[in-house]
Image: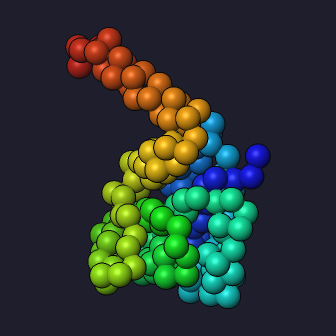
Amino acid sequence: MSPLVGVIMGSKSDWSTMSHSVDMLETLGIPYEVQVVSAHRTPDLLFSYAEKAHERGVQVIIAGAGGAAHLPGMCAAKTHLPVLGVPVQSSMLSGVDSLLSIVQMPAGVPVATLSIGKAGAINAALLAASIIGHQHPEIHTALNAFREQQTQTVLDNPDPREA
Ligand SMILES: Nc1c(C(=O)O)ncn1[C@@H]1O[C@H](COP(=O)(O)O)[C@@H](O)[C@H]1O
């Protein structure tokens, strides 16, 4: 099946964070593609990626980047697809730089910004599932099953002292 979600990141060094998006997409059975694309280092590649993603059937783009994280915003500038931005935790400023770079978009070019790091990467995949689940009942069902299991796990383990 052609990919429904495109996962891009500014550098291979982002993989330890962005792999959590991919893991969750796999858990939910969502076809995806994954690639390193940088607005700074490979601007022409980013433009062609963003312009052509919908032709491959991609419906949502998850873009992770750290530091001066212009990738999600520049990607959003070149596509009508929803772009979910994941701020990667940077070594110097702990990802606050990434977060502010992604979240403060000018009106007219939105990026849906997640939280810094692993939680943001996981939630980007869950948000993608929410978005495309309306058109894909099997993804909607998988998302509901994940949430029910998550709830049940908490209910089944109420004692914080137990492992
Ligand atoms: N923020 C961006 C962009 C971009 O926004 O285009 N391209 C690379 N990067 C970020 O630079 C950080 C360090 O990258 P290296 O580890 O390759 O030096 C990574 O977190 C990457 O997302």
| Residue 18: image location, x then y, percent | 54, 55
Q: In the image, what residue occupies the spot 45% across and 78% down?
A: 73
33 is higher (above) or lower (below) than 40: above
Residue that lies at the very extreme toward the right in this rendered image: 1
Q: Where residue 119 sits: x, y (%)?
A: 39, 48
The structure's colour scheme is: rainbow
Q: Is 12 situated above or below 126?
A: below
Q: Please say whether residue 160 is visible from this viewpoint.
A: yes
How many circles with numbers are drawn on the protein? Answer: 0
Q: Measuring 67% from the left and 88% from the top, which residue is drawn there?
A: 44
Say whether residue 40 is left or right of residue 117.
right
The residue sitting at 40% across, 29% down in the picture is: 147
The quadrant the C terminus occupies is top left
Q: Is residue 31 above or below residue 77?
A: above
Quarter residue 34 falls in:
bottom right
Q: Quadrant of residue 28?
A: top right
Q: Locate residue 41, reporting x and y percent.
A: 62, 85
Q: Residue at the front extreme?
A: 135
Q: Quadrant of residue 95?
A: bottom left
Q: Nearer the viewer, residue 136 or 161?
A: 136
Q: Residue 110, image x and y in percent?
A: 38, 73
Q: Give the residue displayed 63% in from the left and 83% down from the top.
A: 47
Q: Is residue 122 visible?
A: no
The answer to whether 141 appears left or right of 90 in the picture is right
